[in-house]
């Protein structure tokens, strides 16, 4: 009964996915992390991540981050952290209003971003299911980058201006603890909202595997849609993730 229910939930997740067009990409996400429990209430963690795009042929970004988590009461946690990101920005080229004359050209380039986040997460258990909701506010700042954009009117290289961006990320997740089995499935959906509305939706299904309580491996599949988010690759993407975390 319980196994058939989790299978039904996973089928529903894929039923929610929009109809896929031909304009899709495939990438890999690799994650490596460590988590240290300081007390009954506090733990800290660090992680590194590498992403690819363009059917895995192009490196998309790498990042490193640190965070701290505080357990308020059972099932309710507060966390905060910082992430340093180095992005491989895609090439951009636009024309003037007449659609004939070139306006500005930005070749592909690597650029850094600084991201800060604060999250509140809650979960409840029912039988062997866990239902979780996480609300995360994040602020990302992109410093000015010199001589990356070519202005055809000025016939000169100009800077990509710095800017900051606020985002609210809402994620709902269902996981299941299969008795006498170390592989635990989960599904979730995450909405990325800014002041103009939903910018991105990320659907995910995966399996966690724990070894000796200290080692946590995960295999995930993500489908991501992007709607005018200028900080992300503006295509529907199929993403396979591999991660490992050490807990001590």
Image (cartoon, rainbow, N blue to C red):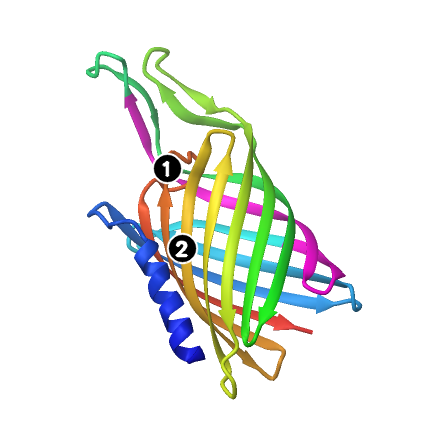
Q: Dot 2 surroundings within 10 Å: few (below 14), some, or many (20 or more)? A: many
Residue marked by disc 1: 227
Q: Is residue 21 above or below residue 211?
A: above
Residue 178 can be seen, yes or no: yes
Local SS, label 2:
strand
| Residue at 45% across, 78% down | 2
Local SS, label 1:
loop
Mark 1 and mark 2: Cα distance apart in space: 15 Å
Q: Which residues are magenta?
A: 66-94
75 falls in the magenta region: yes
| Residue at 41% across, 73% down | 5
Most distant residue in the bottom direction: 180
Most distant residue in the right direction: 39
Position of residue 126 in the picture relative to residue 227 (left or right): right
Image location (x, y in percent) of residue 194: 51, 34
Q: Dot 1 surroundings within 10 Å: few (below 14), some, or many (20 or more)? A: some
Q: Nearer the viewer, residue 204 or 17?
A: 17
| Residue at 54% across, 64% down | 32
| Residue at 61% across, 53% down | 65
On-image quarter of the C terminus: bottom right
52 falls in the magenta region: no
Query: What number is the disc on residue 181?
Result: none
Image location (x, y in percent) of residue 227: 37, 37
Residue marked by disc 2: 203
Residue 56 can be seen, yes or no: no
């Amino acid at each position: 009964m319980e196994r058939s229910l989790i299978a039904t939930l996973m089928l529903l997740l894929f039923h929610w996915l929009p109809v896929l067009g031909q304009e899709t990409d495939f990438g890999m996400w690799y994650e490596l992390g460590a988590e240290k429990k300081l007390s009954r209430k506090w733990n800290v963690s660090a992680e590194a991540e590498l992403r690819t795009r363009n059917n895995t042929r192009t490196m998309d970004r790498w990042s490193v981050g640190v965070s701290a988590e505080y357990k308020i009461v059972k099932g309710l946690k507060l966390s905060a952290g910082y992430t340093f990101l180095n992005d491989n920005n895609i090439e951009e080229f636009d024309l003037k209003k007449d659609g004939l004359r070139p306006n500005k050209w930005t070749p592909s380039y690597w650029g850094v971003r600084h991201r800060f986040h604060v999250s509140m997460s809650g979960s409840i258990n029912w039988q062997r299911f866990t239902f979780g909701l996480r609300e995360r506010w994040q602020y990302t700042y992109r410093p000015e980058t010199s001589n990356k954009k070519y202005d055809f009117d000025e016939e000169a290289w100009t800077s990509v201006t710095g800017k900051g961006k606020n985002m609210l990320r809402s994620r709902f997740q269902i996981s299941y603890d299969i008795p006498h089995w170390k592989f635990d499935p989960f599904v979730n959906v995450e909405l990325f909202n800014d002041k103009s509305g939903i910018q991105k939706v990320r659907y995910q299904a995966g399996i966690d595997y724990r070894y000796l309580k200290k080692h946590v491996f995960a295999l995930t599949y993500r489908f991501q849609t992007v709607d005018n988010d200028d900080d992300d690759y503006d295509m529907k993407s199929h993403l396979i993730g591999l991660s490992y975390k050490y807990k001590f």
